Image: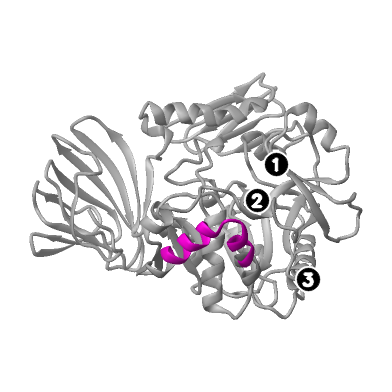
Amino acid sequence: MNNSINYKLVIMSSSPIVPLILCGGTGTRLWPLSRASYPKQFLSIEKEDELSLLQKTIRRIQPLKNLKKPILICNEEHRFIVAEQMRELNIDDFIIILEPFGRNTAPPITIAAIKALELEEDPTLLVLSSDHKIKNVEKFLTILNEGSKYAEQNKLVTFGVVPTSPEIGYGYIKASKPFSNNIEGFTIESFLEKPDLNTAKKLIKDNRFTWNSGMFMFKAKEIIKEINKFTPNILLSCKKAISKSVLDLDFQRLEKDSFEKCDDISIDIAVMEKTSKGIVIPLDVGWSDIGSWEVVWETSKKDMYGNFTDGKVVLENTKNSYLRSENRLIVGIDLDDLVVVDTTDAILISKKNSSQKVKNVVNYLKKSKIPEGYSHTKVYRPWGYYLSVVEDNRWQVKLIQVKPGEKLSLQMHHHRSEHWVVVSGTAKVEVDNKLEILCENQSINIPLGSKHRLSNPGKINLTLIEVQSGSYVGEDDIVRFEDKYGRKN
């Protein structure tokens, strides 16, 4: 890994450290920016920094000594996004494991521990979520150093965030005694599920309680031993899923039938609540899980009136608000405590303290099969992306961008013809075994039923406008004959 960033080098134990980055989740509470097709962990939330939350997760641990190649676990749909974001960090040595479906945290942690033992004799597994924000990175690394010492003693370490408010959206961890300002671990006495507000107000007055961050450190052999002790069926199913897995380009696909038999359960419930080896280390580093627009506002840089703005925003007599435009001009007059988020196809307007309810709206949109609930108009593909500009029942206009050296699958459509106009770059077009090179302002027609492929032979991005017309213009009207990315019909 590249260690050329400005954190002090943290001296960890001599054991190798294998990071496990959990990249699942859909981030529905940050709709409309975050959607199932491109959730929050892959987004750049702060306007002053172009790195995504996933990329920041990787960057902040790079100074750790003895750090080995990370294991990233995600779902099928996001595999190329994860790979591309790693390469944007100039990291080529990593493992991406694909879950056929989500099974909470216990199964993927088990899978990662098994995989880590294939790579190292008995490494320390560092389990991190891909969507956390941490302000004090240097202190965070120091606390990880302390955690590694307990892991070396075969303890199962979790990191409890020191509460700053009576939060009802997090679980709580009760330590055996009150924590102090020193960085040290405490025996875990119990876990509490998300409390009501009155209970939460009582908990934060007791220095034995911290928020459950979902971050862990433990030796790979030790966590497997405890998983086998308390949930042996998970270990058995995970061993079968990984032994029957197949390699697909840069990805390792778990065998579906075996993985399906895993319990859908968190590592907290599966192991941490039952083991006698649990240790909690208080974490006071400016942590946030970016779980709502209100939290995003709280952790963002604001102007003198308490407003965060990004994009084309003009305000008059507005305070304590979050306004973000991805496209159109937003004008706010006499506003207070609002969240306004504009994307190409949806606008969210909410009171800040109501932003937790966004998830309910997204569930309604999905249940009603309204596409804005789960997909963006801009859709990322391994070769680049396409943006739906305008559409109707029988026609659609897209902007397509193809990265240098990349190409789409050899394909055909049963219900639509296409017309391509090159805006910039160079296009190599294959239609029914005939090749043609197109430059800017040149165009070509792709008849219905023709075998065709588009590629970018140049050194700069290829951008073109695609006009589709026919009786059906859905994305599922595609038959692939060849595909360099291993995608199937």
Magenta region: 225-241
* Side of 259 relative to 456 (left or right): right
The residue lying furthest to the top in this view is: 334
Packing grade of label 1 (10 A; few <14, some 14-19, many >=20) is: some
In the image, 465 versus 105, the foreground residue is: 105
Q: Residue at x 43, y 33 (%)?
A: 373
Residue at numbered disc 1: 171
Disc 1 is placed on an element classified as loop
Residue 251 part of the magenta segment: no
Q: Where's residue 263, x and y in %?
A: 50, 50
- The reply to whether callout 1 and callout 2 are in contact (CB within 8 Å) is yes
* Side of 427 relative to 331 (left or right): left
Based on the displayed image, in which of its 4 quarters is residue 425 positioned?
A: bottom left
Residue at numbered disc 2: 268
Q: Is residue 68 above or below residue 461?
A: below
In the image, 482 versus 212, the foreground residue is: 212
Q: Residue at x 33, y 54 (%)?
A: 401
